[in-house]
Every structure is written in C-alpha cells, then in structure tokens.
Amino acid sequence: MMTDEEFESEQLELSLLETLDHVLTRGLVLAGEITISVADIDLIFVGLNVVLTSIETAHEVLGARAQRGLDLQQRALTPVAPEAAPVSDTEGESR
Amino acid sequence: MNLYAYCLCAELRPDALDAVAGIAGAQVRVLWCDEIAAVVSEFEGDAVKVTREHVLAHERVVGRVLMQMTPLPFRFGTLTSEARLRSYIETNESALRAQLARVRGCVEMSVKVMRQRESDESREVRATQVKIDAQPAAREPTGIGTAFLVAKRRALVGDETAQAQAEETARWLTNQLADVVRAEQVSVRPSSALLVAAAHLVERARLAEYRERVRCACAERGEIHFLTSGPWPPYSFSQENP
C-alpha cells in the first residue's frame, strides 16, 4: 500500500511532468529565439513528448515491443521444413 | 544582457508581480508596448538550462499573471532583446490582440486519457492468444517471407485497432464537453501509453460545471484511465506563430 508520503511525492512528480509538458512544448514562439540547454548541450528545438506513465508500465510496454521484435526476428531466421517450404516466395514472378 | 520573456497580456496591475522571482531569481518587470504588456526579466547567458528550478520559476511568474488575468504564455526558454520583442509585438499586434481576446476570461484545462493497465487475468488471456497466433495454421504457407509478412500484418492490424480506439475516445470526449468549453486542442497518440491528450479552453465562471462534466465522463468509462489537471495558462492556445 502506498504511504501518504509516497503519494505526495508521486503527485509532485506528476505535477512537474505536466508543467514540463506545457512549458516545453507549447506557448508563443518567437521564431529562432528559443535556446535551451539540456545537460550542457544547447538546443534550438526540443521535441519533447512526455509520456505520463509509471516506470513499471513503461518497462512493460517497452518489454512487449522488444519481445515482438524478437519474435519477428526468430520467425525470419527459423529454418523451414523442406516439405512445407515453397521454392520461393516470389517463384511466380520469375521469368 | 538578454531578456527572458514569460508572457504577454492586455492589462496588468502594477503590483501584480510584486515579490515574485523570475528565472535565476531575477526581478520580473513589465515592458509596455502600446497596450500590450510583456512580462520579462534580465537574463545573463545565451541559453536557459532546463532545470526543475527554472521550469518552476517560469510557471510561477506566468501563474501569478494568470491569477489576475489570462496571458499568452511564451514557450520556456524564450530569450530576446528589448528591441526585438518590441518589434515582434508591433509587427504582430493585430494577431496578438485577437489571441488575447480569444483567451480572455478563460483558463486551460488538461485531460489525458491513458490505457488502463492490464489485469493479470487479461494479460494471461492475451499471452495465450499470442501463443496460439504464433502457431502456423495447418493450411497457412510457412515461407520465411510469408511468415514475416503475416507477422507484419498482425502488427499493423493491432496498430489500426489502437488508432481507431483512440479516435473513438477523442470523439466521445469532445461530445461530452462540447458545450462547456470555448475551444479545444486534441491530439491522438495511439502508439504511446497515452491515447488522447486534450486541452480545453474553459471560461473561469464555468470551471465548476466543466469539472463536474469531466467527473461524470470519467465515471462513464471505467475501462480507461483519465488524468486531469489545471487550471493552466493557455499554453495550448498560444501556439500559432502570429
């Protein structure tokens, strides 16, 4: 169960994320006059898309994507049994 | 020395910014250009670091103005000179006045719609389905290229379903709140955990009604998760570069 302190801390983080989402991606733009610096690297433009989610959920989402990529890769590399394999996926196109 | 620009507004009481510190603790002042006031402070340096303190200082100053009247906030990190700022306001005066009139008496409210976290049960059902899908059907061709394309097609169908779900949710939300908002900006983002991000421009006098309507809407759709916040300065309604 989440304690009051943890809840308050999560609310503060959420509030900061919401603030970042607003102040960094929206608002009036004076063309060419926004220069901000993140980790000592000057940026003219920041394309920030704050995803509001817990770290756990983010890991789940990223994990599922990575798994899907691995599945596709594995299927592509799996040798196919000779009797089931067509000669070529493009055999009808050969001239 | 640069000027850091926070926001523009149509009127401002002289004491509105008393005792509010700007970026890096700088004193905040008002620069009048005809009848438009620019809220600024001095800034030493060529770039503004994105730190918690700076972001909160920016929001604190704009928030202070919002307590008195609705401003057009500048994006974080806007550094300029007095001459350039005056030139910008003079050049775009009519468009800025129109934007100020549009947001007058309003605040921005935010509604983010997120996918509900899966329950253990539904996760198991989905995992089983994935395993079943992974088995080649008896009559399905199993060539390498075909298998790749079949898998690709499944992924695309999944993406299309997510897109359709997000668009339906956005339409539903718009319909629920149409008569209590003056304007809205909606972005549909089905590829992320966030399905829909909506910003609503709401008249201050109708805030209680708006909140009640959002509360009812959230209760109606228990299968999705809502994150509401506000009132904000109208960042989403100050985006057009006049």
Image (cartoon, grey):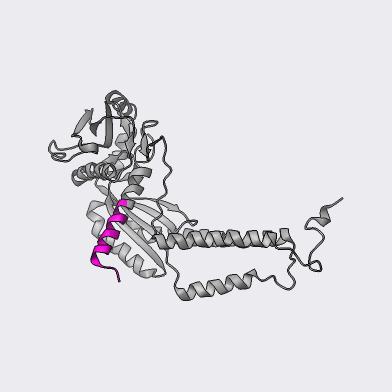
> Is B25 on the left-hand or right-hand side of B125?
left
Instruction: Determine if the magenta segment contains residue A92.
Output: no
Residue B73 vs A73, above or below: the answer is: above
Q: Where is residue B6 in the image (x, y as percent from the top left)?
A: 27, 37
Q: Position of residue B208 (x, y in %)?
A: 24, 59
Residue at point 28%, 61% (across, down) = B211
Residue B168 in view: no
Which residue is nearer to you in this view: A74 or B84? A74
Q: Where is residue B37 in the image (x, y as percent from the top left)?
A: 23, 33
Residue at point 49%, 59% (across, down) = A62
Residue A82: quarter of image: bottom right
Figure label count: 0
Instruction: Determine if the magenta segment contains residue A9.
Output: yes
Quarter in which the N terminus of chain A is drawn: bottom left
Residue found at the very far top of the displayed protein? B83
Residue B97 in view: yes
Main SS, magenta region, reads helix
Residue at point 30%, 28% (across, down) = B85
Residue found at the very far right of the displayed protein? A95
Query: Which region is colored magenta?
Result: A1-16
Q: Position of residue A54 (x, y in %)?
A: 38, 60
Residue at point 48%, 61% (across, down) = A61
Which residue is nearer to you in this view: B116 or B242? B116
Residue B141: quarter of image: bottom right
